Image (tube, rainbow, N blue to C red):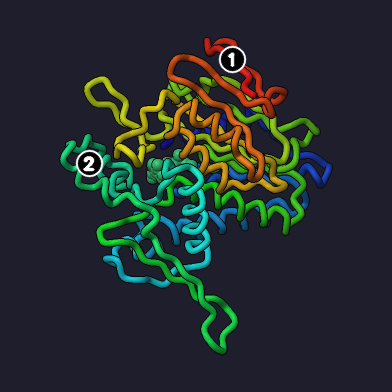
Amino acid sequence: MRRLTAYVFLLLLLLSGCGASADPDKAQESIQVIAMDTAMLITTYGERSPAAAYAAEDVIRDLEKQLSRTIETSDVSRLNAAGGEAVTVGADMFHLLDCAEFFRQQTGGAFDITVAPLVAAWGFAGGEEHRVPTAEEIGRLLPLVDGSTVRYTSEVPEGEEGAVYSASLGPGQAVDLGAIAKGYAADKIAEVLQEYEVPRANINLGGNVLAWGDRPDGTPWRVGVRDPARPDDPNALTGVLELTSAFAVTSGDYQRYFEEGGKRYHHIIDPATGRPADSGLTSVTVTADCGGGSGAMCDALSTALFVMGEERALDFWRGWSGTPFQLVLVTEDGRVAVTQGLADCFTLEEASGYQYEIVS
Ligand code: AMP
Ligand code: MG
């Protein structure tokens, strides 16, 4: 974790440029937040930058309390422990369940929050030991993976104004919002930045970046795309994305993993097999413009497209009729495939040795 923290700081120094300035627009506040099992860095600019940065931190802390699998009182923990009974949940949880169901349907089940029991079996739910479950255990847990049985309702009680939200799961089921929560946090932080009239900000929620506006010198934010083949070297990049007012979310096999018998077992589970997705991809970065796009969409899709693999992911991208998004796919066989819309924004790190392809 300490190494990760140092990396986030270093990356900000390297990529964003720092320093106070007499120009109020360039006043800067940087705060580090350890939450959602990751090191986050919030950097805001402008006259109201301190207040905005702390309001962004509040968003993260509040969401963590609602969505964490390891906090017993969270909506997620209460729902998972309810044995199929309905529980009252907050508006954020309700919205995320709805969003998760949308992406489950869109991705043919590659994204499915009910993969939670398998995430736990492999030791990625937080707190437990990493381990390789037996085939028997995986077979027993797989039938629990079915997001279509998650129920969630909203109702405005008579005489009251606010809605009351509730949710329930099928017997034995559990949910894990780890693949969408940080992207959703980025969306809520974008609302805060708007409210505080922040002209520019760099919000790094550990693999989820919100590049708000441009850099103080008027150039785009530079977001490094890590080299999954070099998980121990956070400075090893496959390339750099130059982005203005955009979300950029990466799912990778290097973010959480353990090794056993010379094999890497990572945290993105294929709901069809109950095992770490073995799709030939080692990372997927999804980007979308802030105007129209959402962090939650990028987050859900980065996970799902990782599961799908290159061919299915690109077919999905080509067939997508929703808010546009772009991709950087890093493959096991040493290629970086970048979709057309990022052709002018991505610069390959020559030393990485990857072969670069533009896809249309
Ligand atoms: P991300 O880093 O956004 O790709 O999210 C990965 C996290 O989401 C994992 O650590 C699990 O908690 C959870 N997860 C793993 N596989 C899936 C999946 N196929 N669909 C939804 N959530 C998943
Ligand atoms: Mg995700």
Which kind of residue does numbered mark 2 sit on?
Ile
- Circle 2 sits on which residue? 138
Local crowd size for mark 2, using a 10 Å CA cut-off: few (<14), some (14–19), many (≥20)? some
Check the picture and name the quadrant holding the C terminus.
top right
Residue sitting at 57 percent across and 42 percent down? 298
Mark before the other along the chain sequence, 1 or 2? 2
Image-based side of 144 in relation to 137, left or right:
right
Check the picture and name the quadrant holding the N terminus.
top left
- Secondary-structure class at tag 2: helix
| The image quarter in which residue 109 lies | top left
Please determine whether, in this image, residue 75 is positioned above or below residue 160: above
Q: Position of residue 257 (x, y in %)?
A: 34, 32
Q: Nearer the viewer, residue 153 or 133?
A: 153
Residue sitting at 59 percent across and 11 percent down? 350
Q: Nearer the viewer, residue 41 or 270?
A: 270
Residue sitting at 49 percent across and 26 percent down? 310
- Circle 1 sits on which residue? 356
Which kind of residue does numbered mark 1 sit on?
Tyr
Q: Nearer the viewer, residue 38 or 169?
A: 169
Distance from Cα at disc 1 to Cα at disc 2: 37 Å
Residue sitting at 41 percent across and 30 percent down? 253
Q: Nearer the viewer, residue 117 or 238?
A: 117
Are dots 1 and 2 in contact, CB under 8 Å?
Answer: no
| The image quarter in which residue 209 lies | top right
Image-based side of 309 in relation to 265, left or right:
right
Q: Position of residue 220 (x, y in %)?
A: 74, 32
Marking on residue 67: none
- Secondary-structure class at tag 1: strand
Query: Looking at this rendering, what residue extends furthest in the right direction?
Result: 23
Q: Position of residue 177 (x, y in %)?
A: 43, 51
Whether the residue carrying mark 1 lies under 8 Å from ligand 1 is answered with no
Please determine whether, in this image, residue 179 is positioned above or below residue 340: below
